Image (cartoon, rainbow, N blue to C red):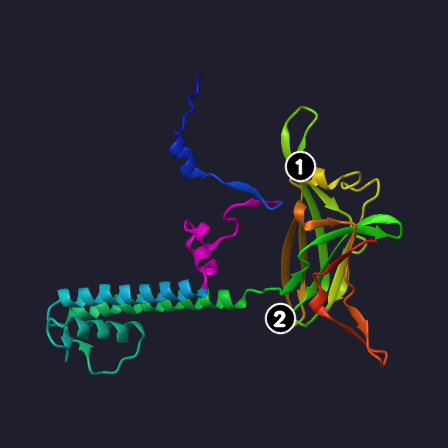
Amino acid sequence: MKIRLKRLSRKQRERLMPRIHIKVQNGHFEIVGLGAWYSYWREPYHLLLTIPWTGFLGLICIFYVTINTVFALAYLAGGDCIANAEPGSFLDVFFFSVQTLASIGYGAMYPKTIYANTIVTIEAMAGLMGIAMITGLAFARFSRPTARVMFSRIAVITPYEGVPTLMFRTANQRRNMIIEAQMRVYLMRDEVSAEGHFIRRFHELKLLRNQTPGFALTWLAMHVIDESSPLYGVTPELLIQTHTMLMVSLSGIDETVAQVVHARHSYGSNDILWNNQFVDIMHHTPDGDRYIDYSNFHDVLPLD
């Protein structure tokens, strides 16, 4: 028994799974359109959650005007079916539809035929469902937890206790506590397997401290480049040649809203500076107190 498989054309394949464009720019390996709101046009729920607020409110206004226009035309088709409304007046039946959809019920206009009552019943049901859906979407947008975490614009490789160490720093901009914060760092680069196949391989970098019970101020992430590190023996030229990129993922529980928040950041090969160190942002006052100066958060100094 032979089974014939239907061969899909190129357009059919692209319709099922569109092309994903990848580009390398300024040392960053980027997937074009990743996470962009307009990429969810096939998924209305995700689109309405990710679209900017101006677009969301604009769509709601368009939907509101459209549905009232549709019901207004339905009332016009029934002739003189609305009491105290001028026959043939689109504005009168439109604003009657607005009152019905919102369950306002001023009483000046009301349905007086079976046809009009039937349309009112349908519109009332549509109004209940529409209000519930819009309220749910608005609440989902407002209730999404977000983290305001700042990452240093560059990472450095500098000696620490005599061993080259990769460092970058983060800061909690919200001035609250992120409890049970965890950080993971992944190195991504182009590699060729023993069989000669090109692959984009991920390596997790071990940090000296990858979690903290409370993240309120700053956090200096440190990865020691020893014999077990994927960065051991790597040169700046090799980082560029293999399109190396660091992906940082930070997550924890926001103490204010008691919800999990997360943040991520990436460093391209051009964002990693060798033989540099971060400018110290911790200072002391004459009284012996300490303070943090965030104005130098991204600044580095070359080693002597």
Q: Which mark is residue 241?
A: 1
User: Mark 2 belongs to which amino acid?
Assistant: Val
Image position, residue 259 (x, y; %): 63, 66
Using the image, determine if residue 257 lies above or below residue 301: below
Q: Which residues are magenta?
A: 28-52
Kindly state the secondary structure of the residue where label 1 is placed. Answer: helix
From the viewer's perspective, is 51 left or right of 111?
right
* Residue 149 placement: quadrant: bottom right
**Residue positioned 18% across, 70% down in the render:** 116
Label 2, on which residue?
257
Using the image, determine if residue 286 lies above or below residue 232: below
Can residue 37 be found in the magenta stretch? yes
**Residue positioned 64% across, 54% down in the render:** 265
Please name whichever residue, 156 or 249, is drawn nearer the observer in this view of the structure: 156
**Residue positioned 35% across, 69% down in the render:** 128
Can residue 71 be found in the magenta stretch? no
Image position, residue 95 (x, y; %): 23, 75
**Residue positioned 70% across, 70% down in the render:** 177
Which marked residue is nearer to the observer: mark 1 or mark 2?
1
Looking at the image, can residue 107 be seen?
yes
From the viewer's perspective, is 139 left or right of 292?
left
Image position, residue 127 (x, y; %): 32, 68
